[in-house]
Each structure stands twice: as C-alpha cells, then as structure tokens.
Image: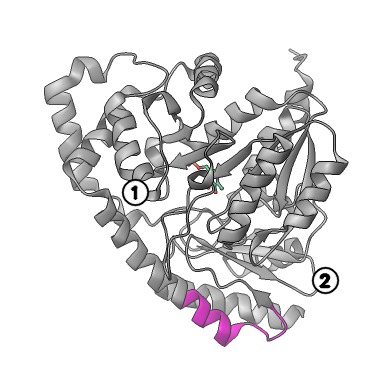
Amino acid sequence: MKYNISDTAQNAKASEVREILKLTQTPEVISFAGGLPAPDLFPVEDIKNVTAKVLEEDALVALQYTTTEGNDDLRRAIIDQRLKPFNMEASLENIMITSGSQQGLELTSKMFINKGDTVIVENPTYLTAISPFKSYGVNLATVNTDDDGIIIEDLIETIESNKNVKFIYLIPDFQNPTGRCMSVERRKQVVEIAEKYNIPIVEDSPYGELVLEGEKLPTIKSFDKNGYVIYLGSFSKVFCPGFRIGWIVADSALVEKYVILKQGVDLQTSTIDQMIVARYMQEYNLDNHIEKIKDLYRNRRRCMLDAMEKYFPENIKYTKPRGGLFIWVMLPETEDSKEILQRAIEEKVAFVPGQPFHAHGEVRNAFRLNYSNMPEDRIEEGIKRLGVILKEIL
Ligand SMILES: Cc1ncc(COP(=O)(O)O)c(C=O)c1O
C-alpha cells in the first residue's frame, strides 16, 4: 500500500549521523559517541531487592494503571531529595512524572508551539530537542554561547527581532554537547529577561548533579519566584536510563495542562517502574550512589583530557568541563568533522560530529566526545587513534 502520511511524518528524516553511528555498535569499536552512562554502576542488586519487595507487597497496585501525574511517593521523593536541597520549591501539584525528560521536551512543544512560532535555543544545543521542536513547525532562533553559556545581549536582540517567541530552551549545566555551564550571573539575568518579555524558560538539567570539580551552581529555577521557569529533571544520568523516568516542575495550572497532553501520548509513565524507583529512594541513598558515579566519571574525564593533551595536535581547542558527560572539540574552520568520522570509523573509533547540534547545521568543524561509557584503557587507546587521524588530516 502507498501510505498517505502526514507532513510531520514526511519531514521526519532519519538522522544521517545516527545511521553512521549504528555501524559503531560493535564491541571492537571504541565509541565516544553516545551519551550512555557507565553500566558498571547500575545498582542491580539493590534494584532486584526493591523490585521483589514491590511485587511481594504491592503487586496489584504495581501492575495496574495509575494517575497521569505519577506515583505520589515518587513525586514526594523527588521534591524532598532532588528539588528542595537545591532550593527549588515545589509541592505535588507542581510536578508530573514523564517518560524520560525527552517526553518533557515533546509535551512542552505540544504545549506551546503553533506552526510558525519561534523557540529560542542555544547554538549548539541538544540535537534531540531540535527534532521535536521542528516537528511542530517552529522557527528555531539560535543564540550563540561562550564559556559562560548563552550570550545575554544576543538573547535580548533575538527576542526583540522575532515574533511569537514561545519559550527559551536552555541546558545550563554541563551542556550537551559542549559540557559548559552557564554562569550564576546569567542564570539570574535570564529569569529577569523571562519576566520582562513574558517568555517562559525551559531549563533542561539531566547533568546538573554530576559535578566533578568545584561547586554545584544554583538552578535557574531556584531564582524563579513567579512561575517563569519550567524545569525538566531525569533519573537517566544519575540512576538508570532504562527506567525512562523524568519529571517536569512547573506552575500548577501548567501542570494540569501537561497532564491532559500526556494522556493523549501514553496515559501515564509505567506504574511498576515508578514504584521501584520510589522504593529505591526510600530504602537506599541516591546521593551516595551519585557520589560513586562522580568518582568514576572524574577518573574517566581526567584520563580523556590527559590523553587529548598527549595525542591531539596543538591547534585543536576543546572544552575542559567541570562535570557531566561530554567534551566539545573545535577544529580549524576548514575541517569537516563528518569526514573525520568516516576515517575514525575505519580505525574503529567513533564520536558525534558537531553539525546536527546546530539547529541550522551551519557549523561543521566541531565534534562531541563522551567519556562516561568507556573504561580508561579504551579511552586512552581511542584518543590515541583519533590523535593519529587528526595529525594526518590537519
Ligand atoms: C540535554 C538532554 N535533555 C534530555 C535528554 C533525554 O533524557 P531522558 O533519558 O531523561 O529522556 C538528554 C539525553 O541525553 C539530554 O542530553
């Protein structure tokens, strides 16, 4: 049959980069491409233990439908353990559980975007945010970033020169892809801008707790007293991505709308998964678990940066992130990282080229490296191989 599919489906193109990277999913390839957490640290025994308890004590609830807002114990645990300690005030009516923070991005697009509206994103930004935004027919306005995050003067100019700006999408902590953090001063300034221009901020912070060096910076949400910031959180990088559990914190009226929108998408996030995570948070100490993740990533990051220093040619610049999962590499302007990737795959090493992180695809001479997923000996070997290729090409 010839299907008469929608314009949205018509326009949804398989990412060229993802297709290339599929080739790299074999054990012999040293992959710095995905944003995968270290599986060695998934607390498997603890999860087995709490899963058994949930099924022994509460199976009929765990296997039943639940509310769209999400499991109350889980929402309370998130408020007490992941929001309050970071000065984010919320009560149950301000929080909805999502199927990963990726669903938060999809629902936020549904919530705000009419065809032709503008959404402001950092340049570069998380590539899998670009696609849901675009699928709603948005005009994506990009604002350049520097070592302190989004450049405020450019943000103001972009707001003033675009119609119907619906929200500003920011990843202030250990940004994907650059690994940079937005300065505290700019965090305060963007809240003032949101209030002045009446434009909400979507703060996406899956990496905020993975501080490997220095202090954790206050969230943008913690400066928001009037409901201008929609905060997206996730267990993917601080627990296990396989549960697919994230959360949205927003003004209660907005959460009511999010609930209605989510019903049309999946009714609710898995009941049993929410109960397992809630029980884990009651019985174990997630903060201690996060400390273990940080210890491991600190070593892997150090190993990658040391190897880059040793093996990369000198005219290559890269970020030295204080946390998160990624290092952003900037090549001389004439280079195309997609071509370098082809060479790298021949040498069985992979990364993500920079172009798809730019909403308009204009930057080709950068790429993203991930250090969370490979053990140190593979990191050293992979960077060594990349160094040879880069020296050859440049
Ligand atoms: C910035 C950012 N937002 C959202 C997500 C989606 O995460 P989740 O697993 O919670 O859906 C990711 C995943 O890598 C990400 O990097």
- Image-quadrant location for residue 298: bottom left
The residue that disc 2 covers is 333
Residues under labels 1 and 2: Cα distance?
43 Å
Q: Nearer the viewer, mark 1 or mark 2?
A: 1
Which numbered marker is on residue 336?
none
> Is residue 314 found inside the magenta-colored segment of the image?
yes
Q: In this view, does 337 lie above or below 233?
A: below
Q: Is residue 89 left or right of residue 61?
A: right
* Camera sees residue 182: no
Locate residue 308, reporting x and y percent. Answer: 57, 80
Q: In this view, does 221 lie to the left or right of 81?
A: right
Q: Which of 343 and 64 is in front in this view?
A: 64
Q: How many labels does the image show?
A: 2
Q: What stretch is highlighted in magenta?
A: 303-316
The residue that disc 1 covers is 85
Q: Earlier in the sequence, mark 1 or mark 2?
A: 1
Residue farthest toward the right in the current orientation of the protein? 161
In what element is the residue under mark 1? helix
**Magenta stretch secondary structure, dominant:** helix
* Category of crowding for the residue at label 2, using alpha-carbon neighbours closer than 10 angstroms: few (below 14), some (14–19), many (at least 20): few
Q: Which of 117 and 49 is in front in this view?
A: 117
Q: Nearer the viewer, residue 390 or 141?
A: 141
In what element is the residue under mark 2? loop
Identified by mark 1, the residue type is Pro
Q: In this view, does 161 lie to the left or right of 3?
A: right
